[in-house]
Image (spheres, grey):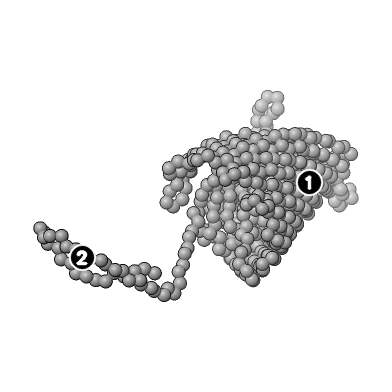
Amino acid sequence: MGFTVPEKEIILKEGAAPVNIGTIEMEVSTNTLDEVKVTSKKAMLNTSIDRKVYNTSQDIMAQSGSASDILRNVPSVEVDIEGNVSLRGAGDMMILINGRPSPLMGKNKAEALRQIPANTIERVEVITNPSARFRPDGSTGIINIVLKKNTKAGFNGNVTGNFGNKERANGSVTINYKTTKWNSFATYSIRQDERNRFGNTDRKFTDSITGAVTGFYKETFRSKARPLSNLLRGGLDYTIDDKNSIGISANYLTTTQTRNDVLNRTFFNKNNIVTSQSDRLRNAPAIEYEKDATVYWQHNFNKEDRELRIEATASSQSEDEKNYYTNNYYFPIKKTIPDFNSVNQIEYNQQVTADYISPIGEDAKMELGYAGSFIQQDIDFYTSTYDTSAQKLIKNMLLSNRFKFNQTVHAIYGTYFKTINKFSYSLGLRAEQAFVKSNLVSKDSIIDNQYFQVYPTIHLAYKLNNGELQLNYSKRVNRPEGDDMNPFTEYIDPLNLRAGNPKLLPEYIQWLYNYYAKIKRFGILNY
């Protein structure tokens, strides 16, 4: 495409009369191009009124790592050596998958994040002050992992594998098949890891009345485990017509491991003279299962961006942990004594949501919705102690217990977004009614608790010439879980006891967040 101009020599001299060069005619010039490539790159990090978005396409770890590896590179997010995630230095946050609570992100979320292949993640959203549309759980905010939706027709697949030191390895296989109406996908991943732990405990005993030192205690701890995890994910979407679509997806995660612990214990009197020395050995095989299924229906209205989505999820999580102990006494010398305990825990969870989104004009949007959460948890703790006369382990009725926990939360919400020139704002309100029942089965006692709470959210943003100024406010909640409300003492270690409180109420947090994003060539600087 273009034009050519015929060559013509023109000589101009100083002081000479003007020269009329006449009409210059251009000729059309055509060229045949082999190909034209138009490429673009998303910025690795950008911001919106209520979140920071980290696009994984520029991250090399997104090609072969896991979700945990991706999160390590996200600003304000930290992942420790065991895969535990923290946001702004605190671990009390909520992790969503595609904007929805996922059963995989429960107690075993560290293992699940290690199993999700990084190449299936499109972006990670850090929502420090979420709008009323999201659950207010998690005092420090929300991490939302958005998975890719394959738009390529036909059959596609991906295979990745990683090997590391300490005999660590993981691999995954992802396949996808898409037609005009159908889209199906499946992912299988496996991970073998090694976990070595070391720790020290130092205590000082004092008289409760005089405060005088009566003795000291020192403990060294080392543990080794090699967990093996398997994750299977799959789903199917069907486009009924240009207005309606339905789908189903499911996850299945298993983790097996055997922990071997050694605790060296030494007691001293007030003069630092050894009074007792022993070892406590632990062999603890454990297996965990997590499975869930989700179905949805989405309706798109004639008006652009107006939609209604109804979704339901059912899940179950189970844990079976056995602890075999051997107590060896070196000073004073005593007979070796065994003991045993086990924890069998199962949780059922159901979630129902209905979300309606509607634009209002060209610069405003409204969101309305309902969310219901239903949890049933059963914790069975069994312990046996050594009977010297019978010379065998016998169930300890005083230390064994069973606890059931039920929680139902109904929520409705509404949010309103508006943009006026360089200024934009979002106002939201979420109202929740919670019903909690603690069943102390071993004591034949039931404790009921209920509470109502509203959670307002405000987001303000003003665009500057080279950045954006934000001021956000939200109210958050930290709800006690079943373990926190279980009043029975857990005697896994007689010197480190733990018990909950069935009358425990939620903790509420008020967040006021000021944020300045200055756009630079290679990213965003936060102030």
Residue 397, image quadrant:
top right
Q: Is residue 237 above or below residue 520?
A: below
Residue 51, image quadrant:
top right
Task: State whether residue 169 appears in this view.
Answer: no
Q: Name the residue rendered at 65%, 53% in the picture.
A: 98
**Residue 340 location (% of width, % of height):** 80, 51
Task: State whether residue 119 appears in this view.
Answer: yes
Query: How much space separates mark 2 and mark 1, taking CA atoms?
Result: 88 Å
Which mark, residue 161?
none
| Other-residue count near label 1 (Cα within 10 Å), few / some / many at <14 / 14–19 / ≥20 | some
Q: Which residue is mark 1?
A: 375
**Residue 204 location (% of width, % of height):** 65, 35
Q: Which residue is mark 2?
A: 21
Q: Name the residue rendered at 65%, 46% in the picture.
A: 358
Q: Is residue 320 above or below residue 502?
A: below
Q: Is residue 453 above or below residue 363?
A: above
Q: Name the residue rendered at 47%, 47% in the picture.
A: 524
Q: Secondary structure at mark 1?
A: strand
| Three-letter code for the amino acid on which mark 1 is drawn | Ile
**Residue 439 location (% of width, % of height):** 84, 40
Q: Residue furthest top?
A: 210
Q: Name the residue rendered at 25%, 66% in the picture.
A: 23
Q: Nearer the viewer, mark 2 or mark 1?
A: 2
